[in-house]
Amino acid sequence: MPAAIPKKSRKPPQSPALIRRRTLRVLGTDISLLEPVRARAVADLGFDIVFESLDFPSCQRKAALNPDSYDVYDQCFHNLDIVWFWGALQPIDTGRIGTWARINDLAKAGGIDKYASRGYGDAPANKLYVQPGLSLGPEPSRWIAMLPTVHNFDSFGYDKRVFGENAGRESWALLFDPRAKGKLALVDEPAIGLFDAALSAEAVGAVRFKDIGNMSVAEVDALFAFLHAKCREGFFQRCWSSAQEAARLFRERQVAIQSMWSPGYNVLGEASTMITEAAPIEGYRAWHGGLSLARHLEGAALDMAYAYLHWWLSGWAGAAMARQGYYVSVPSAVQNVLSAAEWDYWYEGGEAREDLVGADGATIVVRRGARRSGGSYRERASRIAVWNTAMDEHNYVSRLWARFVAETNARQR
Amino acid sequence: MKRDEQQAAMGVSETAGQENGGRLVSVRRYDLIATALRANIASGRLPQGLVMLEGPIAALMQTSRAPVQAALRILEQENLVHRFGGRGYLIGRLGVAIEPLRLDIHTLELNISAEIDEALQNRGLWERAYDDVEAAVASCLIFGEFRIIEAELGTHLGVSRTVVRDVLSRLHERGLIAKNQSSHWIAGPLTAQSVRERFQVREVLEPEALRLATTAIDYEGITRLRVRAGHSNEPVNWAELERALMELCIFRAPNRHLIELIQHNQMPITAAYRALSRLGLPEDEIAAGEYWTLFELISARRIDAAAAYLRNHLKVMAEKNIARLRIVAVVSEAQSIVPYLTPYRVE
């Protein structure tokens, strides 16, 4: 529709506009906002990009309450609907994402193949597609709420000097083994750490969940009664908020067993030979990240955002993610960028034929001869126990969890 | 207005502010306020175009804002005031061009009849405090479980323990607080499970109340509402439409007990919605559309169809409310909590 021409347009001619490089603002967490990725994207795309990296809750809060402060939201599917229902985002037209067709079935259909375990909780496919009425659901449509990108299957790490070798019989129950007393840490985010705690509580037989991905109030209360009892017994060392902090806890031998994220294993230093990443018999706690478009985007700014989304899955960013232990939804594109040795180690679960560098492209994070815990991508993706999830009772759980975390960390001071 | 008419309009002639057999009886304060404002508009003391704001009226009438809000809505339905681009309401019919007139209502020397003044003042001390406490308690529910410290509440309100107990017993009666095993007064938490259960109750009660109300529905009021919406470009908030559905239809069912059940059952979910709106949650235009469909069916006297539609609508709203409740998790509780409510810790 042509805009009406204002009648009083007799202003003096304005000075020519300053030519400014256009900038794309990305809001996210340090899971994926890596400086090498930003620098490479700027070089490839020809516009400036700024990253704003926050912790999970601050990131969600900002995304929901200040939707004009960013262009692209780089976060996880499990807290997507919080921001989506706030009306802060706009649907993504998959017709404009060249790599869409190559995204694998883990994100699109809920499992890596039809026989793989789906896991409880928020599989990304359940929140992926925009449904009539703007709700989110699994029925495929041209429009999606978040472009699936980085993901992983998390477990816990433990110190072999305390627990010995447990290969083949590693259970989440190990977190509440008597040897873990005073030496246990959990990640402090409610939609993540809660499930490490819940998988462990169920593994030791303290609580039984009908659906661990959508707990009832009674189940939540039982879980917290258990956690508070363990807290009083002195089990918890602390709750951490970044992979770096977790690694430090291991390096300083403050903990012997804890929730663990992949990048943390790359910065264990001397301790790395003593710390094992478990492949739990009950399965992994999975998570999936993605990119969303801010509601306010239009015109040239929207084009830039689409270009960034498409670029993100074209291989280079995925290779950087692989070097910190994360997978990406278009593995075939990543394979083109990684060396054969890197691909075999990170995706195929093979033995490292040479020393491998991390996401910074310089530091050696994997020594020759090492083998990734849990095997290949396909094997790990087939053993999902539960997804990081904002359950129906998420608000109730988050508040109990916040009190639990505060109490645990206060005990240590 | 003659005294008996006035009292009829007040709807409180017998019981205003009195204790009835030892039981505290609520008065319809918004009716009292509406009556007082109506009389002053008629006499011209409240001039055409005057901007009516809740806060100053509440201060003048020595009441909280909620009943003023309700009174202004009544006057709006009567076409005595209307909404405009700014905050508040303008005196005068919608469609008549009037310049907003901003005056301090305290300087207008309103004529408030002795009966109304008395009725407003006679309400027990506890009642004047009650609305504020109810609002505070209701809005804490979404943030988890809280203990109400009686002494703190007394200090906060500047009232005696007796008054505090009256307030608490009313909150208890309305299902907003309960006593736990340690004999502490506990509010909350509002869980997804309780939201779901309350909506199940709504699905059972409200369509049936609508059926019972068939001959008592204010069909003219619905017509006025639809006509007014047809003339206005402003989107109407769905919660206001829900309130209109209650006032014009469902609460007219000839069964007081049923209406009370419905009101009490809705209270925590309505409170949660209000708390979320204050946080800036966007409007749900789809829900508003569903209320307009309902009003269309009711206007066409298709009450059975409307009742069935209402039941489905409530099913959808239950899921939306649960989704909204998840959102609350990103909001910290600190800014919303009054001093007499303290987070309850299970040890």
Image: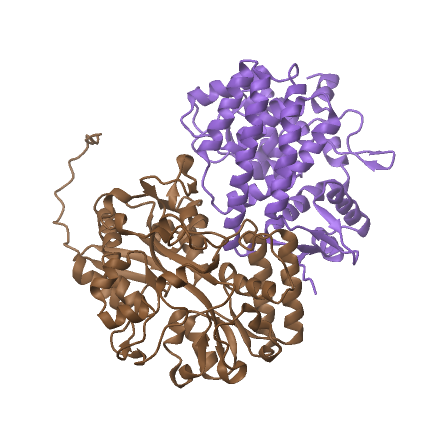
User: x, y (%) of residue A186?
Assistant: 52, 70
User: x, y (%) of residue B57?
Assistant: 60, 35
**As displayed, is residue B34 above or below residue A149?**
above
Q: Nearer the viewer, residue B147 or B156?
A: B147
Residue in the picture at 59% in, 23% down: B307
Quadrant housing the C terminus of chain A: bottom right
Q: Which chain is brown in the rendering?
A: A
Quadrant housing the N terminus of chain A: top left
**As displayed, is residue A314 above or below residue B138?**
below
User: x, y (%) of residue B254?
Assistant: 72, 20
**Which scheme is used to colour this image of the protein?**
by chain
Q: Nearer the viewer, residue B198 or A298?
A: B198
Residue in the picture at 77% in, 49% down: B164
Residue in the picture at 24% in, 52% down: A310
Q: Is residue A70 visible?
A: no
**Left or right: B65 as drawn, with respect to A292:** right
Judged from this view, the residue extending furthest toward the right is B21
**As displayed, is residue A220 above or below residue B81?**
below
Q: Is residue B126 visible?
A: yes
Q: Which chain is purple in the rendering?
A: B
User: x, y (%) of residue B341?
Assistant: 67, 55
Residue in the picture at 66% in, 16% down: B216
When asked about the image quadrant of residue B181, the answer is bottom right
**Left or right: B105 as drawn, with respect to B205:** left
When asked about the image quadrant of residue A298, the answer is top left
Marker count (numbered): 0
Q: Nearer the viewer, residue B65 or A35?
A: A35
